[in-house]
Amino acid sequence: MIEVMFGSLWAMLTSPQTMGLMLIAVLLGLIVGVTPGIGGRLSIALAIPFVFGMQMIPGAVFLLTMHAVNGTSGQISSIMFGVPGDGDDAATTIDGYPMAKKGEAGRALGASITASGFGGIVGACVFAVMIPILEPVVLAFSPAEFFLLALLGITFIAFIAGGENIFRGLIVGFFGVMLATIGTDPYTGTPRFAGDYLFLWDGLSLVTAVLALFAVPEMIALGVQGGSISAVSRETARFSYRQLFEGVLEVPRHWWLALRTSIIGAVIGMIPGLGSSAAAWFCYGHAVQTSPNPERFGKGAVEGVIAPETGSNAREGGALLPTLFFGVPASSGMAVLLGAFLILGIQPGPKMLTDQLPLVWTLIWALVVGNLIAITFLLFICRWAAMLTFVNGAMLVPFIVVVVALGAYVAEGQWENLLILVGLSIVGYGLLRAGWPRAPFVIGLVLGKIAEESLHKAMELWGLAFFLRPLSLVLIGLIVLTIAYAVYRNMRPSKALADLRIVQ
Amino acid sequence: MKSLLGKYSNSSMTLVMLGIFVVMVAIASRYPAEARFMPFVVGIPAILLCLLQLALDARARHRPPASADSPSDLERAQATASQIVGHQVELGASGTTEPQLSPAETVHRELVLWGYFLGFIAGIVLFGFWVAIPLFLVSFLRFQAKVGWRTALLLGVGASVALFLVFERGLKVQVHSGFVTSFVLDHLSR
């Protein structure tokens, strides 16, 4: 184990290709994080065409690093201008913006960037510690459980993304699984839903579907909304590098809080269904509750910046665990990442622990090294990176649409994919307009093939009795409980939980 | 009409989904047993879910309408933050939100943007990427993002050249050259 662990680090650090890609990924991830209108999920979808055909490890490191450092730069606009980019950042704004208004923007930024990086590293460590603990559990899973895990994954994402109405999320998830059945049936060779269209015989292009469901609707929405996200003055926040350094030192000064909230964030990340902002809000709440002076919070307490940042970034390490070992993405961002991993030839599941352990360790190290590079970069450039907040959304739209079209074409080299792109974009925009979730679609599409294969194997091995296996019964119980709780919540909405879902 | 559309918009999506599942299950019923197994396993419960959703939509229509002043995401975040810290918290600076668009203006902008998108895709299919990209970028930047001709040309052509170098030269990807462009080039080369 130790040999694989450090061998992976050495191989990564000595590979100019992997390290070069990691540097690019950090830079792109930080830019995307601070730029309005492009979320982490969308940035991964847009990056997929560029990693197509790349080797497994450099491609996976590139995508994971980009995804992991995304949140590190997201809080800049929250602190400098009081404009939270998403739910995670809203928690940082509570104390970050008052600090900036008091003339301590540099201190708040230094603390938040360092805390974010620290959280990312602790999250990766928690993931590493969990490997030997989880190994016997993962290896005990059979095809029966993997089929049910796919259903559980869709149910969890439908639960978080569907809001008070889980059924909409389930319908969209099943739509994804249904589209995953397009193509030649592996058992009879029948071209399902493909007719004479040869380009569909290999199945629907995952890249095209993801771009159509996420990128195009987001771009149309951004174009409709127009303008930059902020109309506030660019001179709002004062800044000095001395303060920035003082802020960096706040994290070791509050190391016990940072460590606790990082672990809380990583554990929350492991639980599919606990929304992206839950970690940040839980950790913020924890910091308030455990502080001897809770009245300082909301008025510029530095602990109020450290806690949500460590928690939200540590979540990525935790979220990687169910994604890689069970094929169940813990969030919609991880779902897109999982889709990208499948395209690179990475098959999630127990084999990750047996055949692909060096890859797992490389990904853990990528989280650690990527976060260290991101902190270093951002501490130098955060002052200027903040200006990206004022980029006009309408200016970004055409460039992203061009990348989307190129991505949809390059993925398979088929012009017909452009027609699929249009068709699914219309569906995606319809879902966006009607307030339906889109994340379960990706999970369904990604897990569809795995689910079908597992179902066939389970039926061959045990027939319908596979539903009665002890682990199967546990998973079925979880699915039923999740749906039942969602229905209960729909009838008696709990304010606290609704608030935790602020922005998905 | 608008209120009617709003009232039934969620049901419309459910009906679209129901239609898709019904058609796919019907098509799958003609396949051999093993091939139709998965589409049935997924499609039939999905049809039932759609029917259940339609019933829920119908029930929701009989409920009193939600208040027009229902809290925004930011207001909900503020409420959560205030609850945690025990006093009123202001999230975000004043003047950070864009003015709300009227429904008519929203639909107008949506149609324009869809027009650009569909025109761009049609342009690629007919004339190829390297003709459609600069035309799309320049026209969008000039007429939609409202930048000057010089900036639009500089950004549009510059980005097109950069993408050409990355994809055609760097990644050695042969992109679609367009049916009309290929036809014309074939004729000219004869």
Image: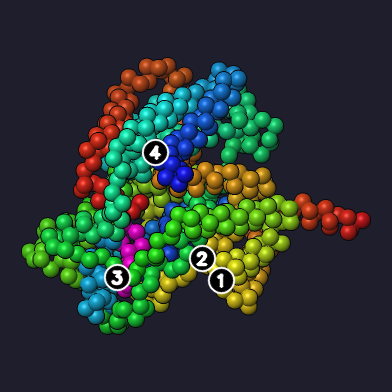
Judging from the image, what secondary structure is the residue with disc 2 in?
helix
- For label 1, the residue is B146
Pointers 1 and 2 in contact (CB under 8 A)?
Answer: yes
Between A222 and A291, the one nearer to me in the picture: A222
Q: Residue at x 70, y 51 (%)?
A: B125
Determine if marks 3 and 2 fall on one subunit: no
Q: Under tag 1, what secondary structure?
A: loop
Is B71 covered by the magenta stretch?
no
- Residue at mark 3 shares a chain with residue at mark 4: no
Q: Which residue is mark 2?
A: A394
Q: Residue at x 36, y 44 (%)?
A: A161
**In this figure, which residue is indicated by the disc labeled 3?**
B93
- Which secondary structure lies at badge 3? loop
**What amino acid is labelled 4 in the image?**
Gly
Nearer the camera: disc 3 or disc 4:
3
- Dot 3 and dot 1 within a common chain: yes
Identified by mark 3, the residue type is Ala
Q: Mark 4: which secondary structure?
A: helix
* Residue A169, label in figure: 4
From the viewer's side, name the closer residue of B186 and A185. Answer: B186
Label 1 neighbour load within 10 Å: few <14, some 14-19, many 20+: few
Q: Which amino acid, mark 1?
A: Lys
Amino acid type of the residue that numbered disc 2 sits on in the rendered structure: Ala
Dot 3: few (<14), some (14–19), or many (≥20) neighbours within 10 Å?
some
* Colour mapping: rainbow
Label 1 vs label 2: CA separation?
Answer: 9 Å
**Front: mark 3 or 1:** 1
Q: How far across and how far down the image is residue B112, in percent?
A: 57, 57
